[in-house]
Image (cartoon, grey):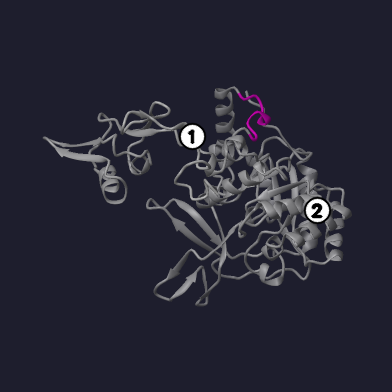
Amino acid sequence: MADLSNDFIGIKSPNPFWLASAPPTDKAYNVTRAFEAGWGGVVWKTLGEDPHIVNVNGPRYGVVHSADRRLIGLNNIELITDRPLDINLEEIKQVKRDWPDRAMVVSLMVPCEEPNWKSILKRVEDTGADGVELNFGCPHGMSERGMGSSVGQVPEYIEMVTRWCKEATDMPVIVKLTPNINDIRYPARAALAGGADAVSLINTVSSIVSVNLDTMSPEPSIDGKGSHGGYCGPAVKPIALNMVAEIARDSETAELPISGIGGISNWRDAAEFMALGAGNVQVCTAAMTYGFKVVQEMITGLEQWMDEKGHTDLQSIIGKATPNVTDWQYLNLNFVSKAVIDQDKCIQCGRCHVVCEDTSHQAITQSVDGKRHFQVIDEECVGCNLCVSVCPVDECITMQQMTSGVDPRTNSPINSEYQNWTTHPNNPMANS
């Protein structure tokens, strides 16, 4: 059986599944239940300085559902822990003592002054925790106070605070990055320049998920008013994957360890993050949706897949997809694929025809001869795969690769000098 044991920057855990810093990791009771369920580690919910934070006593979450009521996006306006610092530290110490084989990382956020960071780091060290995560990502509440994403959006601040922390502690330091920025590579480079042992990403996306049209208030609504919050869940996974890949393939940060976060709901999601360079993964929304035992499916599923593919340990998959992420200009324009409809599986719903006819390339015909029949017109199909995306029947429509270098519309070779966009005559910069 595949070995799922994880060594992330020297922090060991029996598997790569950690709970992210969030409500599920706010107290010893929750964390103990998580470890009993099988989680490999936790990042304790972000600690701050006393006097402790006061959270709202009303709705804290806004939700985006799919048509079948599955939760695909969760917006929250909850702040960092509102429990006294002393109590949190004592519980961290006790849980780590009770579960020595599990990873215990503590998330931190204090005002951007060196003495504040040095003071809290010393107190965390005394708990026996395995490491700290600097929360430079929270986009709401704390950012208005000069913390969270207001630090994470300024690379100079990231480097400065990271350096303070590395000078003040021997614990591994992970820097948690905000996605609310134009180019994730710059904060990652700043973290590395400050001496960070790793980065974790993504934190939540700044958002308003809905408006109550009866009260005309954003949701969640507190006494008729709403605020932007942090968006997470399956809907943010594509954003997170891209940002992880950008750091993993950047020449300046390629060796920087990454803890992947963002919409991880099952073993496949985790495998995708690790294939793009993440050394482990952190989960929140899935646990808040299905409970802590969801990790058991993640563990079993990842083991079975690795066994089927012949992967003996996590190192055999980490970063394996990164070299295949490239810029658009380097894509092979000689590659040609066309849609093919399996008539035995087709239920004649017509969605492929409608979307292609209305919004794409008019490449799917509709005929009626006793029953409706849909057929792809190869000469018009550009291989966009929209029909595959909207078809309700799995593998009814598939993409079939054509002979490399041959234009199926003319059956003539494609000029090899047009192989990529850099030299394509339609590129206005090609001859500059």
At mark 1, the secondary structure is helix
Q: Does 302 sit above or below residue 75?
A: above
Is residue 258 covered in magenta?
A: no
Say whether residue 106 is visible.
no
Q: Residues within 10 Å of mark 1 (few under 14, many from 20)?
A: few
Q: Residues within 10 Å of mark 2 (few under 14, many from 20)?
A: many
Q: Quadrant of residue 411?
A: top left
Question: Which residue shows up at 56% across the image and 68% down it?
Answer: 228
Seen from the viewer's position, the closer of residues 383 and 3 is 383
Q: Given the image, on which type of amino acid does mark 1 rest?
A: Glu
The magenta stretch is 311-319
Q: Is residue 432 left or right of residue 5?
A: left
* Residue found at the very far front of the displayed protein: 431
Seen from the viewer's position, the closer of residues 425 and 299 is 425
Q: Given the image, on which type of amino acid does mark 2 rest?
A: Gly
At mark 2, the secondary structure is loop
Report the residue marked by disc 1: 417
Report the residue marked by disc 2: 194
